[in-house]
Image (spheres, helix red, strand yellow):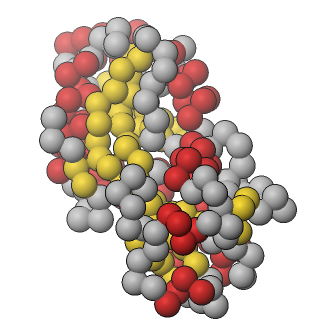
Amino acid sequence: DIKSLSTSYRDPFAGNLNLGVIPTIGPFLLPYFSGPLLKTYPKLKLAYIEDMTERLTDHLLAGQLDAAILATQPLDPALTCMPLYNENFFVALPHSHRLCGQDEVSLSDLDDVQMLLLTEGHCLRDQALSVCSTATQNQAVRATSLETLLGLVAGGHGVTLIPALAIRTGCISELGIDIRPISDPQAFRRVNLTYRKSHVRPQIFDSLTGLISSKLPPSVSGIKV
């Protein structure tokens, strides 16, 4: 609103800040920085919107979001991004799987395995298909959350890729799923903070990027920029 916009002009670290985040990042990253963000900038009125990449991008372009945490590079020339971190992929396996006997898994080990994927529209689906191009997709599964995929892994329906931050989720230990690192260096995704080039408060994104990077756990690698 006009009052919030006026406040933001006077103090870029005050007023409303609408931040989008995709479902395969939000539950695992927000606990690390949302509290410190409030303490560092107590005048900010934060709102978090979780959705898939395409819709968050549309909201950014429409001015309904200030920024979004995405795992893809912006394609629209009106948008830009700052890198936050690189996040390795791991393989989630049922206890009975043959690959559980290995300390780590190579991409060639995943040839012809039954790969469980999220539904179309999730960037993690596209990234998994890119990383494991020779794996066999389980066509009977159309899941909308990592938690559902992990439940199916525990039931022996196949394997899935899981980003590093998600390994700490409680359902992994509860379900007794085995997690193995992938030895191939290209098995990772880059997470960015994306925003409009024309945004009136660009300095807030420098600060937000720095704050998030400073709170990252050792399981992901921050990017020096």
Residue plotted at (60% across, 86% down)? 98
Residue plotted at (34% across, 13% down)? 197
Residue 223: x %, y % from top left: 21, 44
In the picture, measured across the screen, residue 138 lies left or right of residue 69, that is right
In the picture, measured across the screen, residue 210 lies left or right of residue 145, that is left
Residue 118: x %, y % from top left: 67, 54
Residue lying furthest right in this view? 140
Between 16 and 127, the one lying in front of the other is: 127
Residue plotted at (63% across, 57% down)? 134
Quarter of the figure with the N terminus: top left
| Number of numbered tags placed on the structure image | 0
Can residue 219 be seen by looking at this rendering? yes
| Image quarter of residue 208 | top left
Residue 51: x %, y % from top left: 59, 39
Quarter of the figure with the C terminus: top left
Can residue 28 be seen by looking at this rendering? no
| Image quarter of residue 151 | bottom right
Residue plotted at (64% across, 90% down)? 96
Between 94 and 151, the one lying in front of the other is: 94
Residue 3: x %, y % from top left: 37, 13
Q: Is residue 60 above or below residue 139?
A: above
In the picture, measured across the screen, residue 100 lies left or right of residue 117, that is left
| Image quarter of residue 54 | top right
Q: Is residue 133 above or below residue 101?
A: above
